[in-house]
Amino acid sequence: MKKIYLLLVCLIGLKCFAQQPDIALLRANYNYVHIIDTNFKEQPRKEEMLLVIGKNASIYTSFDKINRDIAMKKQVEEQMKNQEGSNNMKINVSSLGYRPTTNVDYFTFASEGKFFVKERLINNYLIEEPIPVFNWSIEKDTMSIGGFLCQKATANFKGRNWIAWFASDLPFSTGPWKLNGLPGLILEAYDDKKEVQFLFNNLEKVIAALKEKEETDLKNKVMIMGSDKFDYMGSDISLPKEGIKTSRKDFEKLKQAQKDDPQGFAKTQMAAMGMSGDIRISSVSNSKTGGAKVPVMNNPIELPAIN
């Protein structure tokens, strides 16, 4: 644990380097459907995802996670308020009633050739990776999705044969997850077995949405507190200000440390930031399995290479 503490201290000193922010123009919502366990194909994982789109950059994240984090943040704020002045604050965060969400966000800065994966272990960690390359074959087939004329494209990527439908009338070379590289926004995509699907839900202009939100907040006198977790709903696309740059190798060490001792890891993270206290996270689910086997991940979105 001492080695992990030293690693944390070093990493926390490496705040993220600035990428050129981009203006958010559109937000697209997708229904993500993934058969994570091939033994339970009738029980796919379902989640609502969000793609924030700019001229030169994009962010892909879980919309369900944003809503969950807002609710959990309220829990923390209420408990902090009730314990104001305490030198040994105890926070209990319950995720009761929430389904598992994708804990990884993707930031693409196409004009700079930069791609970042953000994962959260109490702190936000940023891992730079090469921009995924898809060798698309554009076909003649077309169909309408959400009122937009879309064209078909196919490509093989990480063990799956992908089929994507892109809209040339939306001139953004991006899409959900890591999908990118077509002359139009990808509104729908799935592999040829339909084990992983990104299904278009809706599209909105950011400026119009922000104006409506401001009017609603004013009407309801709601105070929105700043946090990078919720900046996805703002007017720009940028990396989280407090993101910690790390390598994939070091991040995997931190994940293992958290798995081995969750409470000890949390205290180490807090100590490395000069904080003290006790954070306990309850992940009790309200679903009743009745003793049935819970699906496990044996079918990742990126399949392992076959030697």
Image (cartoon, rainbow, N blue to C red):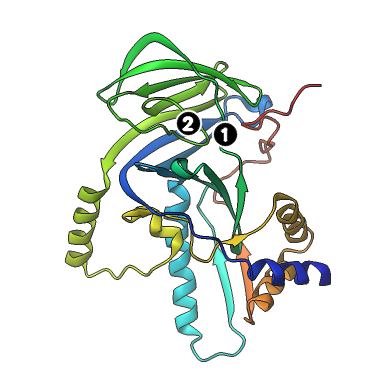
Occupied quadrant, residue 3? bottom right
Nearer to me, 239 or 110: 110
Mark closer to the chain start, 2 or 1: 1
Q: Could you tell me which quadrant the N terminus lies in?
A: bottom right
- State whether residue 47 is above or below residue 95: above
Say what secondary structure mark 2 lies in. loop
> Disc 2 to disc 1, how far (Cα)?
8 Å
Q: Residue 159: give x, y in percent of width and height.
A: 66, 23
Q: In the image, residue 79 lies at what x, y percent?
A: 49, 77
Q: Residue furthest top?
A: 140
**Amino acid type, residue under disc 2 in the picture:** Asn
* Frontmost residue, 292 versus 120: 120
Q: Quadrant of the C terminus?
A: top right
The residue beneath circle 1 is 132
Residue that label 2 marks: 180
Q: Badge 2 local density, few (<14 within 10 Å), some, or many (20+)? A: many
Report the number of numbered marks: 2
Tell me whether the residue at label 2 lies in contact with that at label 1, contact meaning CB atoms closer than 8 angstroms. yes
Give the amino acid type for the residue marked by disc 1 in the picture. Answer: Pro
> Is residue 152 depicted above or below 233 in this figure?
above
